[in-house]
Amino acid sequence: MARRTPLYQRLIGADYADLPDITQRIHNVDGEKIARGRGRVTRNKSAIGNWLADCLGMPKAAADIPVAVVFEEQNGGEMISRNYDGHILTTYQAEGNGRDAGLLKETFGPVALFIHLDAHKAGIDFHLRKATIGPIPLPKMLRPRVTARERSQNGQHHYFVCVGLPFVGTLIEYEGTLDLKQQDHDERHTERIDVV
């Protein structure tokens, strides 16, 4: 059976070849892979901001913590489980359909974000184009404010994400670096139990 083209490569197209090597390796998901590294998390300090972050299952604030990310190919998309020192945030990424074809659709709970991937030699910039709660599109003034990018940094995969909400401000900001390891099937299976 022919290998399916990875999700990010399908969405980005020819520009995928211009991405840094580590960025391509992170997104060449065929089955399952695990990346590990270190990260930091900053949250909104207000009571309502923290409550909203908790409701959305976001990790707690921390200055320097171990991070493990499991990428698992599912139904043409990817289930991504991010383990922030024991706190797990899972989202599903796939290609949008209909008018949203060509956009990355990331879902968690009832929320879906539709994102344009801007790929270049330095990495990927993520631009939010649409957000929905269930089937209901959010008007632009009520959408989250998202700044997100991926870069190569000293041979490691560096990520940065900042999510803000209208009337609340920055809800959460997290960044860190990830490394990939070559693992045989038994190691991968064992580590998956630890990570997820």
Image (cartoon, rainbow, N blue to C red):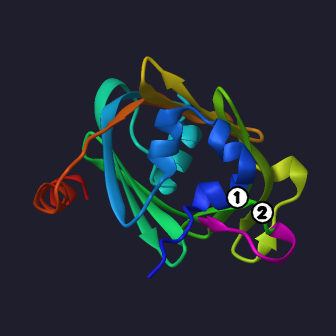
Residue under pointer 2? 102
Task: Please give the name of the residue rendered at 29% of the width and 29% of the height, measured from the top-left corner.
Answer: 65
Give the answer, above or below, for where 13 lies relative to 161: below
Q: Is residue 53 left or right of residue 118?
A: left
- Front residue of 17/191: it is 17
Q: Earlier in the sequence, mark 1 or mark 2?
A: 1
Give the total number of marks visible in the rendering: 2
In this view, 48 is above or below 40: below
Give residue 160's quadrant in the image: top right
Q: Position of residue 55 (x, y in %)?
A: 50, 56
Residue 97 located left or right of residue 47 = right
Q: Are marks 1 and 2 in contact (CB under 8 Å)?
A: yes
Q: Looking at the rendering, which quadrant does residue 60 occupy?
A: top left
SS for tag 2?
loop
- Residue that mark 1 sits on: 11
Residue 42 seen from this side: no
Identify residue type, mark 2: Gly
Q: Which residues are magenta?
A: 94-100
* Residue, far bottom: 1
Q: Is residue 179 left or right of residue 138?
A: left
Residue 191 x/y as whole percent: 17, 53
Q: Could you tell me which residue is drawn at 16 percent across and 56 percent down?
A: 184
Q: Image height check: is 50 above or below 108?
A: above
Asked if residue 188 shows in the view, the reply is yes
Quadrant location of the N terminus in the rendered image? bottom left
Reply yes or no: does residue 150 show up in magenta. Answer: no
150 or 7, which lies in front? 7
Crowd class of label 1 (few under 14; some 14 to 19; many from 20; radius 10 Å): many
